[in-house]
Image (cartoon, rainbow, N blue to C red):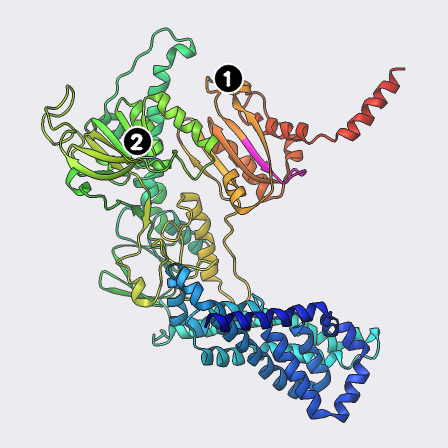
Amino acid sequence: MKLGKLLLAAILLAAIALFFALDLGQYLTLDFVQEQRAQLEAFHRENTFLTALLYFGVYVAVTALSLPGAAIMTLVGGAIFGLLWGTVIVSFASTIGATLAFLVARFLFRDQVQKKFGHYLKAVNEGVERDGVLYLFLLRLVPVFPFFVINLVMALTPMKALTFYLVSQVGMLAGTVVYVNAGTQLGQLESLGGILSPSLIGAFALLGIFPLIAQWIARFIKRRKVLKGWKKPKSFDRNLVVIGAGSAGLVTAYIAAAVKAKVTLIEKGDMGGDCLNTGCVPSKALIRSAHFMSDVKRHREFGVREASASVRVADVMERVKRVVETIEPHDSVERYEGLGVDVIKGEATITGPWSVEVDGRTLTTRHIVVATGARPFVPPIPGIEEVSYLTSDTLWEIRDDPGRLLVLGGGPIGCELSQSFRRLGTDVTVVEMEPRLLAVEDEDASAFVESALIDDGVRVLTGHRAVRFEVGEADGGDPSPGDPAESEDKGGGRAGVAVLQQGDDEVRVPFDTLLVAVGRRARVEGFGLEEVGVVTTREGRIETDDYLQTRVPTIYACGDCVGPHQFTHAASHQAWHAAVNSLFTNPFKRFKVDYRFLPHATFTDPELARVGLSEDEAKEKGTRYEVTRYDLSESDRAITDESARGMIKVLTVPGKDRILGVTIVGPHAGELLAEFTLAMKHGIGLNKLLGTIHTYPTLAEANKAVAGNWKKENAPERVLSWVERYHAWRRR
């Protein structure tokens, strides 16, 4: 077998090498065909069958060897044989050649590839077995990828050769007709002036719009396949049903009502979702109280001789509750009903592509938008259920001092809450299995945050992985002074010990309250998604295309249940696209979600905010860049505010002022980032930023300052040397 593969590979390589060595590609160009058109037509008239046979053989060889020139040969086929026979010959020759390439690639590579990467290709293999015919048909119909790539890739999958041949024959037929038809017009050219003939313009116009028509046909076929077996209502009760009244669902319903669509919003829990009730709003209220306590402790830095404050967790949590209640009317049932949204409090189940059941009542709708959000992920670590734990959802119910707080997870949620509780007087340890906190950010940026947490008194254990939890004290003895006398902790759970692994060492950390903050998982169960054919990704999120349409064409999804960015503003951004694409769906125009200029921030002190590429991402993608920095210790306003720590780091295209990404660490970094987000979105470079007047003294001046640093680093030295000579001459 190995000898056969080596022999076949040698023959193929020799044939390809011979093709390029003899420059045979010159005979597969439009110029050559135009020059030899008369001779080719004469030879065809005298040797009709032989011409067709030779053309057929060459076409099969070209496609089987994946050589360049197939497109030109298709045009030649139309020019020589006409539309009917040209289509027949090209259709069979191209399909046979593609199948030969498929078989050769399978013989040479499939076993090795599947053996080495079979684990990673499992999902691909299952997808091909389930929908391979449709995938191949769509790829043939819509020429997104070169056909020779499709031949090679499909050879590595379990698809049968006969299936590949038949689907390719049918799928490539439409494109073949279009190209051959264009070739018939080329064959009629007598001069260059003929290029502008109406028939030729029409042929190339057909080539231009063919991908659009093909995409529409492909979507139509896919839609019919997915919806097969479901009975479509003759009419609909409403235009849109939105499931979930978090950020994504509220914005979707708002937009639908604003454009006068009949929309129903279903929510089984609290209006406002995680952001209002357990996420953004309560956490920022907590952070503000903690920041105040930090300023009191730093009173001497502000020239205040005496200042003190005492704090109780219960009082802070009551303030957090009051803040949430103040904002609640913005997301209330009454407000949205006033906007024209039909709001139903209940549990929704999708019963079909056009129907949703809620509390025994069936609603029919033209489209459905799923915006069910996410919930805290609790890792299956042995013993975690025995010690009990809090999450970002349940944390806000505590009223007692949490005692020794162990925070599992050093991402944005873990860092924000760790610092806040420490500033409120709680003993805090944060555990992160990655080598550093905020691992998705650049190391120099996350180092600022880690240093700030340590300065506040947080015990930071990076590179530590929790392997199990045990109930009771670490040494099994009596509780130390200030610890609970029982195994019940002050936060309402059970005191315990976290057993951590750092390399080969085992570390035991006793705690009274455990806060799990290792991430969030999409809510996808219990809504009937799987029953109607909506699929999820490996990460457990709802799978959508770039337009937020699921596999079921009448169902869209947005927000944290989709990801990949679980931010409130990302959910709102997606919601606009889900609403517009579902309400105004048409064959040719849809709106693709663009995440390139999506900002995000971690609200520690100092804050960390970013938009666009980080340095790590730029390196990973192989993107060339320049880095310009500005140290916030030089900012006059930061100095006056006693917050002069942090930086602004801007990545630009080498030698140009176009911004690729910005990372800011410092006070109000989230607000400072907005100017850069606007600049990137609208193509404004650092030169124009430098030319913009900024109020003095403000932190925003730092944005202009970093633009100034870029200008210094990219100063035109040659021009400046001539300017220096000019000024020297003027002094004479």
Question: Residue 43: horizontal and vertical position, in percent?
Answer: 77, 88
In this rendering, position of residue 674 left or right of residue 325: right
Front tag of 1 and 2? 2
Mark 1 or mark 2: whose residue is earlier in sequence: 2
Distance (Cα) linking label 1 and label 2: 30 Å
Front residue of 207 and 278: 207
**566 vs 143: above or below:** above
Tell me which residue sits at (26%, 49%) in the image. 269
Question: Residue 109: horizontal and vertical position, in percent?
Answer: 48, 67
Question: Residue 133: horizontal and vertical position, in percent?
Answer: 44, 75
**92 vs 31: above or below:** below
Please give the range of residues in magenta: 649-657
Q: Residues within 10 Å of mark 1 (few under 14, many from 20)?
A: some
Q: Is 294 part of what is drawn in magenta?
A: no
Tell me which residue sits at (43%, 61%) in the image. 549
In this rendering, position of residue 85 left or right of residue 131: right
Q: Inspect this view and state whether residue 293 appears.
A: yes
Residue most toward the right? 732
The residue where tag 2 is placed is 430
What is the secondary structure assignment of the residue under circle 2?
A: strand
**Amino acid at pointer 1:** Ile
Q: Is 656 part of what is drawn in magenta?
A: yes
**Amino acid at pointer 2:** Val
- Answer with the quarter of the image where residue 553 lies: bottom left
